[in-house]
Image: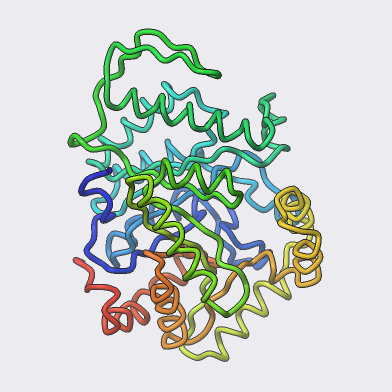
């Protein structure tokens, strides 16, 4: 158990984070001129904004090369542990995660890097562990992506070694992938607890890994407006975790556009997503998604509905629309959401100013500390 860290530093019933700010373009495949730059200056401004308005956490994407297109989507990226360390040193409250492809980082090196970040942030670092999926990136490293089952077997040993390093000294580890002698790394994580661990697992194997190892389990929200299946999925995940003697909180991600009126919000989404779609990057990303599709029917449906299908679930409208849309996911049992915007620094201030008071009236948020 992560102890007091599980609250992500706030008493809010419904937690909110931001997704993919470490990458140019962020999560949104738009070629609009005002798209997210991903620059260090913009990231620093955003992290301090999170402190100010009370957004609990930042989750980066572990990305090593762009998807192409014009512009090159995610072409400029920051490595996530060093990115997190720098942001933690410049903020006071926001929790910052590192997204770590475990096959690309030796666990002892990663454990030391993460403890460094954790002390810089006085216990505000979190680990988003990724088993890997992007074969193109792994080839760039000369790394073996492994078949699906072995990918998670490797990830299990990796996190076992990391936790052993965080908790013990002068120990050995002899597994199928790692043979380590005399493990000793100090200091340990800040304050006698360990960083929160998050993971997203879509397959049965990935889900089982997440329930065994993570405190925050990320699941996909499907495009259907019916949240009944999501409610069932959340309840099942929590019940399965409890059967393992664990507690787990379930999160997901959505794209948000909030404007003073619904018409303005819908007009902007049409402009940024439809009229300025980054088709070159979408084709590259779509080919990567092909390997993860649940069925050919899902794949055909996604292609037919591009670019909206690659945007994912969208909460679009005026502040009342957006607040009620987010509240629906809380009612479905989610502990929180990570949000994507076309441009964080241009959109988050109005979102926080207009939507947060409505969420407070719904009992989902408390006023920010300021």
Q: Which of 278 and 255 is in front in this view?
A: 255
Residue found at the very far top of the displayed protein: 181
- The image position of residue 127, as x and y in percent, is 40, 41
Q: Residue at x 79, y 56 (%)?
A: 283
Residue 100, compared with residue 262, is above or below; it is above
Residue 68, compared with residue 163, is above or below; it is below
Give the left or right position of residue 148, taking residue 36 as reference.
right
Residue found at the very far front of the displayed protein: 243
What is the count of numbered marks? 0
Q: Residue at x 27, y 16 (%)?
A: 169
Q: Nearer the viewer, residue 125 or 102?
A: 102
- The image position of residue 13, as x and y in percent, is 28, 68
Quadrant of the image containing the C terminus: bottom left
- The image position of residue 363, as x and y in percent, is 26, 79
- Looking at the picture, the colour scheme in use is rainbow
- The image position of residue 288, as x and y in percent, is 74, 48
Q: In which quarter of the image is residue 3?
A: top left
Q: In which quarter of the image is residue 172?
A: top left
Quadrant of the image containing the N terminus: top left
Q: Residue at x 54, y 69 (%)?
A: 255
Give the left or right position of residue 306, taking residue 312 as reference.
right
């Amino acid at each position: 158990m992560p102890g007091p860290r599980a609250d992500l530093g706030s008493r809010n019933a419904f937690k909110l984070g931001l997704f993919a700010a470490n990458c140019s373009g962020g999560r949104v495949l738009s070629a609009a001129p005002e798209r997210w730059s991903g620059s260090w200056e913009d990231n620093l401004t955003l992290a301090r904004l999170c402190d100010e308005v009370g957004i609990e956490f930042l989750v980066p994407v572990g990305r090593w090369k762009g998807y192409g297109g014009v512009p090159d989507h995610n072409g400029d990226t920051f490595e996530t542990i060093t990115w997190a360390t720098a942001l933690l040193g410049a903020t006071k409250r926001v929790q910052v995660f590192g997204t770590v492809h475990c096959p690309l980082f030796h666990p002892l090196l990663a454990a030391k890097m993460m403890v460094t970040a954790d002390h810089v942030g006085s216990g505000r670092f979190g680990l988003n562990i990724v088993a890997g999926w992007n074969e193109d990136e792994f080839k760039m490293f000369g790394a073996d992506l492994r078949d699906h089952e072995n990918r998670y077997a490797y990830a299990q040993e990796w996190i076992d070694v990391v936790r052993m390093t965080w908790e013990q000294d002068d120990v050995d580890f002899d597994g199928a992938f790692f043979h380590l002698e005399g493990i000793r790394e100090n200091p340990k994580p800040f304050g006698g607890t360990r960083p929160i661990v998050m993971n997203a697992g879509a397959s049965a194997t990935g889900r089982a890994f997440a329930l065994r190892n993570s405190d925050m389990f990320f699941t996909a929200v499907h495009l259907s407006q019916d949240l009944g299946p999501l409610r069932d999925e959340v309840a099942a995940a929590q019940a399965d975790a409890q059967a393992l003697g664990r507690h787990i909180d379930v999160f997901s991600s959505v794209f948000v556009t909030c404007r003073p009126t619904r018409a303005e919000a819908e007009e902007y989404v049409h402009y940024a997503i439809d009229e300025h779609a980054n088709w070159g990057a979408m084709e590259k990303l779509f080919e990567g998604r092909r390997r993860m599709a649940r069925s050919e029917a899902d794949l055909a449906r996604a292609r037919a509905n591009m670019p909206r299908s690659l945007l994912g679930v969208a909460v679009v409208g005026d502040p009342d629309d957006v607040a009620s849309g987010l509240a629906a996911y809380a009612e479905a049992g989610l502990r929180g959401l990570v949000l994507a915007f076309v441009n964080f620094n241009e959109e988050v201030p109005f979102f926080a100013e207009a939507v947060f008071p409505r969420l407070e009236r719904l009992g989902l948020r408390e006023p920010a500390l300021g």
